Image (cartoon, rainbow, N blue to C red):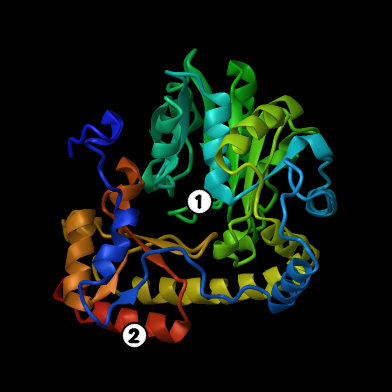
Amino acid sequence: MKNPYIAKKHWEYELPPLSRTDEMAKRYDDIINLSVGDPDYPADKTCLDLMYRDALAGHTRYTEYYGDPELREETIKMYKEDYGVDVAMNELLITAGGTHALYVVMQTILDPGDEVIAIAPYYTYYKDQVEMAEGKLVVYNAPADKRFDVEVEELEKLVNSRTKAIIVNSPCNPSGKVYSRENLQAIMDLAEKYDFQVIADDIYGALNYTDNKMPLCTYEERPNRVITVYSYSKDLSATGVRLGHIIARSDIIDAALNVCGGVTFTICSFSQRFGLYALRRRKEIQEGLRAEYQKRMLYAYERISKLNHVKCFYPEGTFYIFADIRETGISSMDMWDKILDEAKVLVLPGDGFGKAGEGYIRICCTVSVEVLKEAFDRLEKMDIFK
């Protein structure tokens, strides 16, 4: 909509499906919402109690610009204990969640016209984050018939002198794909060959159901090529706490600090106290979290396998099932409406995650098995799935 009081770049903005879920959820009273990746697994009560205690004790003021020193020290300790990776205090910046971290990274590294490669299907807001930094998103469409594995020779064809970075999200939202060690090493080799950065979107690391659990930061001795983005939202079931971090070379972190200062100044002080205690309790928290979501994923996988004209890969990670509906001949967007109107189940259309997602729908297993059962009972009654 043209409006002289709104920047022209927003006049013809197309709202992505993810941003329309609130509107869609109001269409019927008895909808089962499987559209948004907001975990129902409760945030850890011990951490909440300790956060509250610290807030009452005075942790309600600005923290250091890089973040609460105790939280940063605990983060460094985690990377050393879990992955054997050394991170310095000046290589770490606390952020207001993973999305904020990605925004800050793009604003930090991109000049107008710089290109960032995303592996599709990819997280919806990568495009916005790149374009808000005046960059260009270049999409590599991972082949569905190869389980969305990266064909590195084809990926390399997209690299040119303007390539500044590639984003790697493993496990991947929306596909749940965990990229192989060979794929990840080949991407690192490309970054070295053509001199670009690798942005590791490590949002779902704790929800990895394979034996290939080592993040990209372990593929180098010190932060250099890899810029790690982390969030407490999914790994520690704390979406509303809005907490995350960036790990990168110190010169990148220094520049990111300037960007962060202009957006948030500092990060919520008592959220950072939650983060401190959550990292200390991470193994206990994540054991239950991972077991619960893996159970739900396997249940959804089994139910989808019994639907006609639908199939999906065995779950490798996240709490998303990316279901292949191409046999139905119906587009992702049309299926989105059809499932909502006929079954009163709200999912997301796959093409909202890039061209490679056309012919798919994303199903979030962020509800109990009992609710998933009701959702799939409804889907089974649809004529197209009988």
Side of 104 where 154 appears, left or right? left
Q: Position of residue 95 (x, y in %)?
A: 63, 47
Q: Is residue 209 visible?
A: no
Q: Position of residue 186 (x, y in %)?
A: 60, 31
Q: Residue at x 70, y 34 (%)?
A: 248
| Tag count | 2
User: Mark 2 falls on what kind of element?
Assistant: helix
Q: Residues within 10 Å of mark 1 (few under 14, many from 20)?
A: many
Nearest the viewer among 128 and 215 is: 128
Q: What residue is disc 1 on?
A: 172
Circle number at residue 346: none
Residue type at mark 2 is Glu
Side of 320 where 238 appears, left or right? right
Q: Please identify the quarter of the rendering in which residue 25 is found.
A: bottom left
Nearest the viewer among 195 and 69 is: 69
Q: What residue is disc 2 on?
A: 374
Nearest the viewer among 38 and 8 is: 8
Q: Please identify the quarter of the rendering in which residue 53 is found.
A: bottom right
Q: Residues within 10 Å of mark 2 (few under 14, many from 20)?
A: few
Q: Residue at x 56, y 71 (%)?
A: 294
Side of 243 where 332 appears, left or right? left
Q: Position of residue 112 (x, y in %)?
A: 44, 18
Q: Residue at x 42, y 32 (%)?
A: 132
User: Mark 1 falls on what kind of element?
Assistant: loop
Residue type at mark 1 is Cys
Sequence-wise, which precedes: disc 1 or disc 2?
Answer: 1
Q: Is residue 39 above or below residue 183?
A: below
Q: Is residue 51 above or below residue 119?
A: below
Side of 324 where 107 appears, left or right? right
Of the 4 image quadrants, the one containing the C terminus is: bottom left
Cα distance between the residues tagged 1 and 2: 26 Å
Q: Is residue 361 visible?
A: yes
